[in-house]
Image: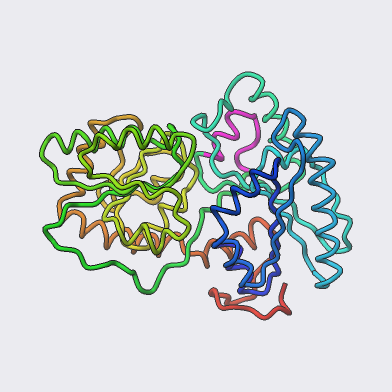
Amino acid sequence: MELVLWQAERGLEPRVALFFGRASERAAWLEENESGLREIERAGVGCSLDVVAGLFSAAKGLSVRFGVAPRVREAARRLVDERRTQHLAIHCHTPFLFGYMLPFDAGVPCPTTMVTALHGVDTAFARYDRGMRNRLYGVLARRCMRHSTVVSVDEPGAANCARYFGVDASRIVVIHNGISIPVEIPRPARDVAAPVRFGFIGQLIRRKGWQVLCDAFERGLRDGSSWELVVAGNGPDERSVRERIASLEGRVRLLGHVARPAESFYPEIDVLVLPSEGEGLPMVALEAGARSIPIIGTPVGGLPRVVLDGLTGRLVAPRDVAQLVAAMRDVAEPRVRDEMSSAIRAHVEAHFSIDACGARWLRAAYGVEPPPGDRGEPRSPAWR
């Protein structure tokens, strides 16, 4: 959403199309993301949410080619006709589905760039490295390479795509995610003697590491640490999470899905913990860093780009409870935490600004050179 809003501010006329396999999936997505959807609509961004039967079934290839592709083509033609578009970019965030509709002819009179975005290619997500999935996704990945610009949000994702699917890693463009840095950080005043409050936000599934975090938190309590834990998110493991935290002495709050984490999650925590087994470059890490919140994470995906061990946070091995406990004790020290808080905001501001990210998307992914001297100022709709 950050990138879409950045593009809208510059008069680039972004449009968002979301596709669901069932009406129930569409309704669930709307319930969780309505506030974000309203925000991009207020920025003038058109957004459609369509149900395409069979999209995530065994027949998904047919659904994409004969259900999704015609809708994308119609939307492209309508946008070009209405706005007199000079350059069209079709940017897909679900790469292995996108491959089913490539090569793609939008049927418009202006130059068109096809872009495939990789948001983490790791065996923690799926067994990309073997069996039928490897063969199928290999075909789709190579098709994306032939007929689109492939962008990865992290270097390991690009390397894994080359390793698993036999594509040329040098042809994958790496563009890290970017974020708007808040001018004012809404941090409620807290008693200096109050317990350190750790936070977790994400989908409640095993590979996100919630169980490891609960085990580490429990071990810290047994050893006399006066910690608190705030968990935000929902997912398939929500019932298991509720059962697990019931045994943690009332020191854990489960918020469920949080529509506006900037208002109701980040101000509540002192340290973010991301004990994932696999990631791309998670936006939650940038959001926390921009708000001066140190991070304890794992060396997976793009996390080590944000979490500089000992400087902006701590890195621990996935599934290693002992390492996680030690890192939590370290960052719980006020002096250490204060130093990391200052360092991580400066690091995120210097390396992950939405202005630098957006400009790189224009140049490297869409093939459009921003006007000379562009430093992120809004542009008139005449330049699009």
In which quadrant of the rendered image does the C terminus lie? Answer: bottom right
Can residue 64 be seen here? The reply is yes
User: Where in the figure is residue 312, as x and y percent of width and height?
Assistant: 29, 53
Residues shaded magenta: 157-170
User: Where in the figure is residue 297, as x and y percent of width and height?
Assistant: 34, 43
Given residues 158 and 124, the one toward you in this image is 124
Q: Residue at x 25, y 34 (%)?
A: 247
Given residues 78 and 55, the one toward you in this image is 55
Q: Which residue is drawn at 86% across and 68% down?
A: 81
Left or right: 159, with 298 as reference point = right
Q: Which residue is drawn at 20% across and 60% down?
A: 338
Left or right: 261, with 19 as reference point = left
Can residue 145 be seen here? The reply is no
Determine which quarter of the picture holds residue 330. top left
Q: Which colour scheme is used?
A: rainbow
Q: Is the magenta stretch mostly helix, strand or loop?
A: helix
User: Where in the figure is residue 336, as x and y percent of width and height?
Assistant: 18, 54
- Does the magenta run of residues contain 165? yes
